Image (spheres, rainbow, N blue to C red):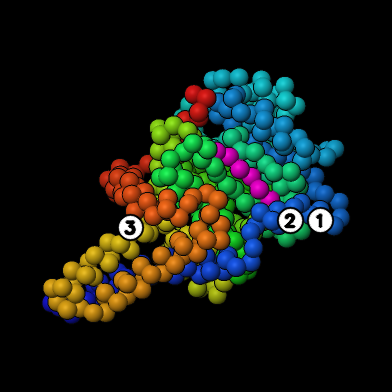
Amino acid sequence: MTFSIQLILLLLLALLAIPVLVLTVQVIAAAGRGSVAAHRAYAPSHGPAPRLAVLVPAHNEEAGIAAVLAALRMELKEGDRVLVVADNCSDATADIARAAGAQVCERTDPVLRGKGYALDFGVRELAKDAPEVVAIVDADCLVERGAIRRIAALARETGRPVQALYLMYMPPDAGPLRKIAEFAWLVKNLVRPLGFYRLGLPCQLMGTGMAFSWAQISGAELATGHIVEDMKLGVDLAKMGQPPLFCPDALVYSYFPSTVEGEQSQRTRWEHGHLSVILTQAPALLKTALARGNLALAGLALDLCVPPVALLTALVGLALVLALIAYAAFALVAPLALAVVLMLCMALSILLAWAQYGREVVSFFQLLMAVAYVLGKIPLYLKFMVSRQVEWVRSKRDAE
Protein backbone atom coordinates (compact mmCIF):
# COMPACT_ATOMS: atom_id res chain seq x y z
CA MET A 1 0.00 0.00 0.00
CA THR A 2 2.81 2.39 0.90
CA PHE A 3 4.47 1.79 -2.47
CA SER A 4 1.20 2.48 -4.31
CA ILE A 5 0.62 5.73 -2.44
CA GLN A 6 4.16 6.89 -3.17
CA LEU A 7 3.85 5.98 -6.85
CA ILE A 8 0.55 7.86 -7.23
CA LEU A 9 1.93 10.94 -5.49
CA LEU A 10 5.10 10.92 -7.60
CA LEU A 11 3.11 10.60 -10.82
CA LEU A 12 0.84 13.51 -9.85
CA LEU A 13 3.83 15.62 -8.84
CA ALA A 14 5.61 14.76 -12.10
CA LEU A 15 2.61 16.03 -14.08
CA LEU A 16 2.50 19.17 -11.96
CA ALA A 17 6.22 19.68 -12.49
CA ILE A 18 5.70 20.29 -16.23
CA PRO A 19 3.86 23.65 -15.95
CA VAL A 20 5.94 24.69 -12.93
CA LEU A 21 9.23 24.16 -14.76
CA VAL A 22 7.92 25.83 -17.92
CA LEU A 23 6.91 28.89 -15.89
CA THR A 24 10.28 28.94 -14.12
CA VAL A 25 12.22 28.77 -17.39
CA GLN A 26 10.10 31.55 -18.90
CA VAL A 27 10.59 33.87 -15.92
CA ILE A 28 14.36 33.27 -15.75
CA ALA A 29 14.71 33.85 -19.51
CA ALA A 30 12.72 37.09 -19.27
CA ALA A 31 14.72 38.47 -16.34
CA GLY A 32 17.96 40.36 -16.22
CA ARG A 33 17.95 42.28 -19.49
CA GLY A 34 16.25 45.51 -18.54
CA SER A 35 12.68 46.67 -18.66
CA VAL A 36 10.75 46.11 -21.87
CA ALA A 37 9.20 49.58 -21.50
CA ALA A 38 12.61 51.13 -22.16
CA HIS A 39 12.73 49.48 -25.58
CA ARG A 40 9.17 50.17 -26.76
CA ALA A 41 10.14 52.75 -29.36
CA TYR A 42 8.75 52.34 -32.83
CA ALA A 43 11.44 51.30 -35.30
CA PRO A 44 10.23 51.50 -38.89
CA SER A 45 11.05 48.46 -40.99
CA HIS A 46 12.86 48.59 -44.30
CA GLY A 47 10.79 48.81 -47.45
CA PRO A 48 7.28 50.15 -48.04
CA ALA A 49 4.66 49.54 -45.38
CA PRO A 50 2.11 46.82 -46.18
CA ARG A 51 -1.40 47.75 -47.26
CA LEU A 52 -3.24 47.44 -43.97
CA ALA A 53 -6.76 46.95 -42.67
CA VAL A 54 -7.52 47.14 -38.95
CA LEU A 55 -10.50 45.00 -37.96
CA VAL A 56 -12.36 46.09 -34.81
CA PRO A 57 -15.13 43.76 -33.55
CA ALA A 58 -17.50 45.77 -31.36
CA HIS A 59 -20.60 44.96 -29.32
CA ASN A 60 -22.26 47.94 -27.61
CA GLU A 61 -19.06 49.97 -27.30
CA GLU A 62 -20.49 53.48 -27.80
CA ALA A 63 -18.77 54.82 -24.67
CA GLY A 64 -15.20 54.14 -25.79
CA ILE A 65 -15.12 53.41 -29.51
CA ALA A 66 -14.31 57.03 -30.54
CA ALA A 67 -11.09 57.09 -28.48
CA VAL A 68 -10.02 53.71 -29.84
CA LEU A 69 -10.56 54.84 -33.44
CA ALA A 70 -8.76 58.14 -32.85
CA ALA A 71 -5.65 56.22 -31.77
CA LEU A 72 -5.94 53.82 -34.70
CA ARG A 73 -6.26 56.63 -37.26
CA MET A 74 -2.76 57.78 -36.33
CA GLU A 75 -1.43 54.38 -37.46
CA LEU A 76 -2.83 54.54 -40.98
CA LYS A 77 -1.32 55.72 -44.23
CA GLU A 78 -3.13 56.44 -47.48
CA GLY A 79 -4.89 53.30 -48.71
CA ASP A 80 -5.26 51.78 -45.23
CA ARG A 81 -8.60 51.49 -43.50
CA VAL A 82 -10.36 50.61 -40.26
CA LEU A 83 -13.37 48.31 -40.39
CA VAL A 84 -15.65 48.21 -37.36
CA VAL A 85 -18.00 45.24 -37.12
CA ALA A 86 -20.96 46.43 -35.07
CA ASP A 87 -22.04 43.01 -33.85
CA ASN A 88 -25.56 42.67 -32.41
CA CYS A 89 -25.39 46.26 -31.16
CA SER A 90 -28.34 47.94 -29.51
CA ASP A 91 -26.61 51.28 -28.98
CA ALA A 92 -24.95 53.96 -31.13
CA THR A 93 -21.66 52.10 -31.74
CA ALA A 94 -22.12 52.02 -35.54
CA ASP A 95 -23.05 55.71 -35.83
CA ILE A 96 -20.17 56.87 -33.64
CA ALA A 97 -17.71 54.71 -35.58
CA ARG A 98 -18.88 56.14 -38.91
CA ALA A 99 -18.60 59.68 -37.55
CA ALA A 100 -15.03 58.86 -36.49
CA GLY A 101 -14.14 57.95 -40.07
CA ALA A 102 -14.24 54.17 -39.87
CA GLN A 103 -15.82 51.83 -42.38
CA VAL A 104 -18.69 50.06 -40.61
CA CYS A 105 -20.60 46.88 -41.26
CA GLU A 106 -23.43 45.78 -39.01
CA ARG A 107 -24.19 42.18 -38.11
CA THR A 108 -27.33 40.91 -36.38
CA ASP A 109 -27.71 37.27 -35.35
CA PRO A 110 -29.26 36.49 -31.95
CA VAL A 111 -28.17 32.84 -32.13
CA LEU A 112 -24.60 32.88 -33.46
CA ARG A 113 -23.09 35.27 -30.96
CA GLY A 114 -19.49 35.90 -30.06
CA LYS A 115 -16.31 37.56 -31.20
CA GLY A 116 -15.38 34.74 -33.58
CA TYR A 117 -18.52 35.26 -35.66
CA ALA A 118 -17.90 39.01 -35.76
CA LEU A 119 -14.34 38.47 -36.99
CA ASP A 120 -15.50 36.08 -39.69
CA PHE A 121 -18.11 38.61 -40.83
CA GLY A 122 -15.48 41.35 -40.97
CA VAL A 123 -12.98 39.25 -42.91
CA ARG A 124 -15.63 38.46 -45.53
CA GLU A 125 -16.33 42.18 -45.85
CA LEU A 126 -12.62 42.93 -46.25
CA ALA A 127 -12.40 40.29 -49.00
CA LYS A 128 -14.16 42.72 -51.34
CA ASP A 129 -10.89 44.68 -51.42
CA ALA A 130 -8.36 42.45 -49.69
CA PRO A 131 -5.42 44.11 -47.86
CA GLU A 132 -1.94 42.62 -47.49
CA VAL A 133 -2.13 42.54 -43.69
CA VAL A 134 -5.03 42.52 -41.25
CA ALA A 135 -4.58 43.73 -37.67
CA ILE A 136 -7.22 42.94 -35.04
CA VAL A 137 -7.84 45.32 -32.14
CA ASP A 138 -10.64 44.97 -29.61
CA ALA A 139 -13.03 47.89 -29.28
CA ASP A 140 -12.01 48.56 -25.68
CA CYS A 141 -8.25 48.66 -26.38
CA LEU A 142 -5.96 51.61 -27.01
CA VAL A 143 -2.75 51.34 -29.03
CA GLU A 144 0.57 52.99 -28.34
CA ARG A 145 1.92 55.08 -31.20
CA GLY A 146 3.56 52.91 -33.85
CA ALA A 147 2.31 49.60 -32.43
CA ILE A 148 0.03 48.63 -35.31
CA ARG A 149 2.55 49.62 -37.97
CA ARG A 150 5.21 47.58 -36.17
CA ILE A 151 3.23 44.34 -35.94
CA ALA A 152 1.92 44.75 -39.49
CA ALA A 153 5.47 45.11 -40.84
CA LEU A 154 6.65 42.09 -38.84
CA ALA A 155 3.73 39.99 -40.07
CA ARG A 156 4.70 40.70 -43.66
CA GLU A 157 8.45 40.32 -43.11
CA THR A 158 8.29 37.04 -41.18
CA GLY A 159 5.22 35.41 -42.73
CA ARG A 160 4.00 34.65 -39.20
CA PRO A 161 1.09 35.99 -37.15
CA VAL A 162 2.38 38.64 -34.74
CA GLN A 163 1.13 39.36 -31.22
CA ALA A 164 1.75 42.75 -29.62
CA LEU A 165 2.31 43.18 -25.90
CA TYR A 166 -1.20 43.37 -24.42
CA LEU A 167 -1.44 44.82 -20.92
CA MET A 168 -4.39 45.60 -18.68
CA TYR A 169 -4.40 48.10 -15.86
CA MET A 170 -6.46 48.35 -12.69
CA PRO A 171 -8.06 51.65 -11.63
CA PRO A 172 -5.63 53.78 -9.54
CA ASP A 173 -7.69 53.30 -6.38
CA ALA A 174 -7.86 49.49 -6.70
CA GLY A 175 -7.26 47.48 -3.54
CA PRO A 176 -4.25 45.18 -3.02
CA LEU A 177 -6.01 42.00 -4.18
CA ARG A 178 -6.99 43.65 -7.46
CA LYS A 179 -3.44 44.95 -7.89
CA ILE A 180 -2.24 41.36 -7.48
CA ALA A 181 -4.64 40.44 -10.29
CA GLU A 182 -2.95 43.09 -12.46
CA PHE A 183 0.43 41.58 -11.58
CA ALA A 184 -0.83 38.10 -12.52
CA TRP A 185 -1.89 39.51 -15.91
CA LEU A 186 1.58 41.02 -16.31
CA VAL A 187 3.16 37.61 -15.70
CA LYS A 188 0.86 35.95 -18.21
CA ASN A 189 1.03 38.52 -21.02
CA LEU A 190 4.51 40.02 -20.61
CA VAL A 191 6.90 37.88 -18.58
CA ARG A 192 5.99 34.45 -19.93
CA PRO A 193 5.83 35.32 -23.67
CA LEU A 194 8.95 37.50 -23.33
CA GLY A 195 10.84 34.55 -21.83
CA PHE A 196 9.91 32.27 -24.71
CA TYR A 197 10.59 35.08 -27.21
CA ARG A 198 14.16 35.33 -25.93
CA LEU A 199 14.48 31.55 -26.29
CA GLY A 200 13.26 31.73 -29.89
CA LEU A 201 9.89 30.12 -29.12
CA PRO A 202 6.37 31.27 -30.10
CA CYS A 203 3.65 32.80 -27.95
CA GLN A 204 -0.09 32.39 -27.64
CA LEU A 205 -2.42 34.81 -29.39
CA MET A 206 -4.10 37.13 -26.90
CA GLY A 207 -7.17 38.33 -28.80
CA THR A 208 -6.15 41.91 -29.52
CA GLY A 209 -3.09 43.60 -30.99
CA MET A 210 -2.67 40.77 -33.51
CA ALA A 211 -1.52 41.01 -37.14
CA PHE A 212 -1.92 38.42 -39.92
CA SER A 213 -1.20 38.14 -43.59
CA TRP A 214 -4.33 38.11 -45.70
CA ALA A 215 -3.77 34.45 -46.58
CA GLN A 216 -3.60 33.50 -42.90
CA ILE A 217 -6.66 35.33 -41.67
CA SER A 218 -8.85 34.67 -44.71
CA GLY A 219 -8.17 30.93 -44.47
CA ALA A 220 -8.66 30.67 -40.71
CA GLU A 221 -11.68 29.06 -39.05
CA LEU A 222 -13.11 32.07 -37.25
CA ALA A 223 -16.87 31.51 -37.17
CA THR A 224 -17.06 29.69 -33.85
CA GLY A 225 -18.51 30.50 -30.48
CA HIS A 226 -15.32 29.42 -28.70
CA ILE A 227 -14.86 31.60 -25.61
CA VAL A 228 -11.10 31.93 -26.17
CA GLU A 229 -11.08 32.06 -29.95
CA ASP A 230 -7.64 33.68 -29.91
CA MET A 231 -5.95 30.70 -28.27
CA LYS A 232 -7.61 28.33 -30.70
CA LEU A 233 -6.56 30.42 -33.70
CA GLY A 234 -2.94 30.47 -32.50
CA VAL A 235 -2.92 26.68 -32.14
CA ASP A 236 -4.49 26.20 -35.58
CA LEU A 237 -1.90 28.42 -37.27
CA ALA A 238 0.98 26.79 -35.39
CA LYS A 239 -0.12 23.39 -36.66
CA MET A 240 0.14 24.80 -40.19
CA GLY A 241 3.73 25.86 -39.58
CA GLN A 242 2.97 29.49 -38.72
CA PRO A 243 3.44 29.84 -34.93
CA PRO A 244 2.69 33.31 -33.50
CA LEU A 245 5.59 35.69 -32.91
CA PHE A 246 5.67 37.95 -29.85
CA CYS A 247 6.45 41.64 -30.42
CA PRO A 248 7.26 43.18 -27.00
CA ASP A 249 8.01 46.64 -28.45
CA ALA A 250 4.41 47.19 -29.62
CA LEU A 251 1.92 47.96 -26.86
CA VAL A 252 -1.87 47.55 -26.82
CA TYR A 253 -3.63 48.19 -23.53
CA SER A 254 -6.99 48.38 -21.81
CA TYR A 255 -8.40 48.57 -18.31
CA PHE A 256 -9.97 46.02 -16.02
CA PRO A 257 -13.64 46.72 -15.27
CA SER A 258 -13.98 48.82 -12.12
CA THR A 259 -16.99 46.80 -10.97
CA VAL A 260 -16.63 43.40 -9.30
CA GLU A 261 -19.40 42.03 -11.53
CA GLY A 262 -17.62 43.05 -14.72
CA GLU A 263 -14.26 41.71 -13.56
CA GLN A 264 -15.69 38.36 -12.43
CA SER A 265 -17.49 37.88 -15.76
CA GLN A 266 -14.33 38.71 -17.67
CA ARG A 267 -12.12 36.45 -15.56
CA THR A 268 -14.52 33.52 -15.69
CA ARG A 269 -14.59 33.62 -19.49
CA TRP A 270 -10.82 33.88 -19.77
CA GLU A 271 -9.87 31.25 -17.23
CA HIS A 272 -12.56 28.68 -18.01
CA GLY A 273 -11.64 29.03 -21.67
CA HIS A 274 -7.94 28.66 -20.86
CA LEU A 275 -8.52 25.51 -18.81
CA SER A 276 -10.68 24.04 -21.56
CA VAL A 277 -7.88 24.61 -24.06
CA ILE A 278 -5.37 22.94 -21.72
CA LEU A 279 -7.56 19.84 -21.49
CA THR A 280 -8.61 19.64 -25.14
CA GLN A 281 -5.68 21.08 -27.11
CA ALA A 282 -2.39 20.90 -25.18
CA PRO A 283 -1.90 17.09 -24.99
CA ALA A 284 -2.73 16.55 -28.67
CA LEU A 285 -0.56 19.50 -29.69
CA LEU A 286 2.40 18.17 -27.70
CA LYS A 287 1.96 14.74 -29.26
CA THR A 288 1.93 16.29 -32.74
CA ALA A 289 5.02 18.36 -31.94
CA LEU A 290 6.95 15.31 -30.78
CA ALA A 291 5.86 13.29 -33.81
CA ARG A 292 7.05 16.06 -36.15
CA GLY A 293 10.13 16.94 -34.13
CA ASN A 294 8.87 20.55 -34.20
CA LEU A 295 10.44 22.64 -31.43
CA ALA A 296 8.20 25.69 -31.97
CA LEU A 297 5.06 23.56 -31.76
CA ALA A 298 6.38 21.83 -28.64
CA GLY A 299 7.08 25.21 -27.06
CA LEU A 300 3.54 26.42 -27.74
CA ALA A 301 2.10 23.16 -26.35
CA LEU A 302 4.15 23.50 -23.17
CA ASP A 303 3.10 27.15 -22.83
CA LEU A 304 -0.54 26.08 -23.12
CA CYS A 305 0.04 23.58 -20.29
CA VAL A 306 0.68 26.41 -17.81
CA PRO A 307 -2.61 27.27 -16.07
CA PRO A 308 -3.30 30.66 -14.48
CA VAL A 309 -0.68 31.43 -11.84
CA ALA A 310 -3.24 31.44 -9.02
CA LEU A 311 -4.44 27.95 -9.92
CA LEU A 312 -0.90 26.62 -10.36
CA THR A 313 0.07 28.02 -6.97
CA ALA A 314 -3.00 26.43 -5.37
CA LEU A 315 -2.22 23.06 -6.94
CA VAL A 316 1.39 23.16 -5.76
CA GLY A 317 0.21 24.11 -2.27
CA LEU A 318 -2.26 21.23 -2.23
CA ALA A 319 0.44 18.84 -3.44
CA LEU A 320 2.71 19.98 -0.61
CA VAL A 321 -0.02 19.37 1.97
CA LEU A 322 -0.67 15.87 0.61
CA ALA A 323 3.06 15.12 0.61
CA LEU A 324 3.34 16.27 4.23
CA ILE A 325 0.44 14.00 5.21
CA ALA A 326 2.07 11.07 3.40
CA TYR A 327 5.37 11.77 5.16
CA ALA A 328 3.70 11.94 8.58
CA ALA A 329 1.66 8.77 8.00
CA PHE A 330 4.07 6.60 5.99
CA ALA A 331 7.48 8.34 6.19
CA LEU A 332 7.48 8.89 2.42
CA VAL A 333 10.42 11.20 1.72
CA ALA A 334 10.53 11.35 -2.09
CA PRO A 335 7.08 12.95 -2.65
CA LEU A 336 7.78 15.52 0.06
CA ALA A 337 11.15 16.42 -1.42
CA LEU A 338 9.67 16.87 -4.90
CA ALA A 339 6.76 18.93 -3.56
CA VAL A 340 9.16 21.23 -1.71
CA VAL A 341 11.24 21.71 -4.88
CA LEU A 342 8.11 22.65 -6.85
CA MET A 343 7.01 25.13 -4.19
CA LEU A 344 10.48 26.70 -4.19
CA CYS A 345 10.33 26.99 -7.99
CA MET A 346 6.96 28.73 -7.77
CA ALA A 347 8.23 31.13 -5.11
CA LEU A 348 11.36 31.87 -7.16
CA SER A 349 9.33 32.49 -10.31
CA ILE A 350 6.87 34.87 -8.64
CA LEU A 351 9.54 36.83 -6.76
CA LEU A 352 11.81 37.11 -9.78
CA ALA A 353 8.94 38.27 -12.01
CA TRP A 354 7.93 40.82 -9.39
CA ALA A 355 11.50 42.08 -8.88
CA GLN A 356 12.05 42.59 -12.62
CA TYR A 357 8.64 43.77 -13.83
CA GLY A 358 6.09 44.05 -11.03
CA ARG A 359 7.46 46.59 -8.55
CA GLU A 360 5.45 49.45 -10.07
CA VAL A 361 2.27 47.38 -10.03
CA VAL A 362 2.25 45.91 -6.54
CA SER A 363 4.43 46.47 -3.48
CA PHE A 364 6.24 43.61 -1.77
CA PHE A 365 3.92 43.80 1.22
CA GLN A 366 0.88 43.69 -1.06
CA LEU A 367 2.43 40.71 -2.82
CA LEU A 368 2.43 38.86 0.50
CA MET A 369 -1.37 38.96 0.31
CA ALA A 370 -1.23 36.66 -2.72
CA VAL A 371 -2.37 33.77 -0.51
CA ALA A 372 -5.72 35.52 -0.01
CA TYR A 373 -5.89 36.17 -3.75
CA VAL A 374 -5.30 32.49 -4.54
CA LEU A 375 -7.90 31.36 -2.00
CA GLY A 376 -10.40 33.83 -3.46
CA LYS A 377 -10.00 32.24 -6.89
CA ILE A 378 -10.82 28.70 -5.73
CA PRO A 379 -14.62 29.07 -6.26
CA LEU A 380 -13.97 30.04 -9.89
CA TYR A 381 -11.97 26.86 -10.45
CA LEU A 382 -14.50 24.69 -8.62
CA LYS A 383 -17.18 26.16 -10.88
CA PHE A 384 -15.15 24.99 -13.88
CA MET A 385 -15.44 21.42 -12.60
CA VAL A 386 -19.20 21.48 -12.06
CA SER A 387 -20.57 24.20 -14.36
CA ARG A 388 -17.94 25.55 -16.72
CA GLN A 389 -18.68 28.48 -19.00
CA VAL A 390 -18.77 27.32 -22.61
CA GLU A 391 -20.47 30.25 -24.37
CA TRP A 392 -19.01 33.64 -25.16
CA VAL A 393 -20.30 36.36 -22.81
CA ARG A 394 -19.23 39.98 -23.18
CA SER A 395 -17.91 41.55 -19.98
CA LYS A 396 -19.92 44.41 -18.55
CA ARG A 397 -18.31 47.80 -19.22
CA ASP A 398 -17.95 50.52 -16.63
CA ALA A 399 -20.24 52.87 -18.58
CA GLU A 400 -23.05 50.35 -18.24
Residue 262, position as x, y percentages in the image: 44, 33
Which residue is drawn at the image coordinates 17% and 79% (left, top)? 331
Q: Nearer the viewer, mark 3 or mark 2?
A: 3
Q: Nearer the viewer, residue 127 or 383?
A: 383
Residue topped by disc 2:
154
Q: Is residue 116 left or right of residue 387?
A: right
Q: Amino acid at mark 3?
A: Ala
Mark 2: few/some/many CA within 10 Å (<14, 14-19, 20+) = many
Mark 3: few/some/many CA within 10 Å (<14, 14-19, 20+) = some
Distance from the alpha carbon under mark 2 to that under mark 1: 8 Å
Q: Are marks 1 and 3 in contact (CB under 8 Å)?
A: no
Residue 15, position as x, y percentages in the image: 35, 69
Mark 2 residue element: helix
Q: Amino acid at mark 1?
A: Ser
Q: Is residue 80 left or right of residue 204?
A: right
Q: Which residues are magenta?
A: 250-255
Distance from the alpha carbon under mark 3 to that under mark 2: 38 Å
Q: Nearer the viewer, residue 113 or 249?
A: 249
Residue topped by disc 1:
45
Image position of 4 with respect to 172: above or below: below
Q: Nearer the viewer, residue 297 or 359?
A: 359
For the N terminus, give its image quadrant: bottom left
Residue topped by disc 3:
314
Q: Are marks 2 and 1 in contact (CB under 8 Å)?
A: yes
Mark 3 residue element: helix
Q: Quadrant of residue 65?
A: top right
Which residue is drawn at the image coordinates 70% and 32% (left, top)? 69
